[in-house]
Structure formats: C-alpha cells, structure tokens
Image (cartoon, helix red, strand yellow):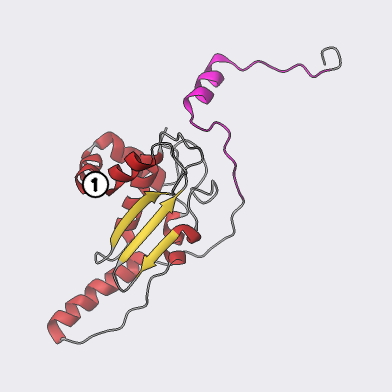
Amino acid sequence: KFFGWEKRVPKTHAMKTTAQQLDNANPLVKTTASMSTVSLRKRAENERSNDFDNNTNNAKKKRDPIDAYEIFSHIKDVNDPEHPYSLEQLAVVSPENIVVDDEKSRVTVYFTPTVEHCSMATLIGLSIRVQLLRVLPKRFKVDIKVSEGSHASETQVNKQLRDKERVAAALENGNLLEKVELTLSGKTAM
C-alpha cells in the first residue's frame, strides 16, 4: 500500500499495445445456458437424398421446418475474432434476432457487435455466413446483417456482407479464410 491506497502496477508496454489494438478490450460476457445442438448438416444430407428420391420416384416427402433456435444452435459457438468468448457469450447473436422462413427457404441473422466501431464486424458476419452455408440445405438463401443502429458503419458492413462477389473473393483470400476457420473452431483470429 502506498499512503493508504493500493499501489497499482503499471501496465507493461506489451499489455498496453495489446489492449489498444482491441476494439473492446473489456467486453461484457454473459453466462449461457446449455442447448443441445441439432444437426442441420444431417438434415441437409437427408433433404438432398429426398430430392434425389423425388426426381427418381416423383414421391413427395415432408420435411421438418427449420426454426430460429436450430439456426442459433449452429452459430452460437462461433468465436469472437478478438476475444476467447463465443458470439453467444458476448450477446452478439441471439435466437430473437434470427428470422427463418422455411417455406421461402430464407434465413436472416441480425448480429450486434460489442461496440459500435467494431472493426471485426465484417469478419464476424462472414464467419456466421460460412457456418450456415456449411450446415444448411442448399435451398436456403442466407442474409447476415448488422442489427439496426448497432454499428457506426452499418450500411457499409451490410453492403459488404450482401455482395456475393465480395464474399466469394474474401473466401478465396487464404489469410482471411484462415481467420474465419479459427473463429469457427472456437479460437480467436487475432
């Protein structure tokens, strides 16, 4: 103690540099409830085989509709690029911000970055898109958007995430694809 106050240890230069590089050096982390993961990948395979059956036998098979909780179960564990926490733990994604229209084969995910100037918003959106493209049946159109009013560059981020050519080009970039793979495997990308 120093004159009745605890002496604070100054941050080392390395600690300062790391904290300054993060958009949100101290994010709010919420506790999460355990939710069983439903295998969309298995359902996608079943739908593909049913499509094959339909083409060969002209038989119509009824499928189970996909809902927001099922979509959420596949994106909740995507990791934040900067922090060792999932998008669910940081409240970036939630089932309430997922819209599914199974009949029209559309999924829209709205995500909320932890800070309004988040430089990782596009990488987060790209990671969510890649995860869903890997598990959803091919019939689905996936839209990923920043929640309204949650990001300073909301329009630009949404435009990038909506542009198929930009997304394709981003996924051909080895460095960027590596960062996406890290977030999908539960690791930080930075």
In the rendered image of this protein, does residue 22 appear above or below residue 144? above
Magenta highlight on residue 59: no
| Numbered range of the magenta stretch | 5-30
Side of 74 relative to 170 (left or right): right
Q: Residue at x 32, y 63 (%)?
A: 136
Q: Residue at x 51, y 51 (%)?
A: 88
Element assignment for label 1:
loop
Residue under numbered circle 1: 163
Side of 57 relative to 25 (left or right): left
Image quadrant in which you'd find residue 174: top left
In the rendered image of this protein, does residue 157 appear above or below residue 19? below
Image quadrant in which you'd find residue 122: top left
Residue 52: x %, y % from top left: 17, 76
Q: Nearer the viewer, residue 136 or 108?
A: 108
Q: Quadrant of the N terminus?
A: top right
Q: Nearer the viewer, residue 23 or 76?
A: 23
Classify mark 1: residues with Cα within 10 Å, few (<14), some (14-19) or many (20+): few
Q: How many marks?
A: 1
Q: Residue at x 48, y 31 (%)?
A: 23
Side of 95 relative to 131 (left or right): right
Q: Nearer the viewer, residue 177 or 94?
A: 94
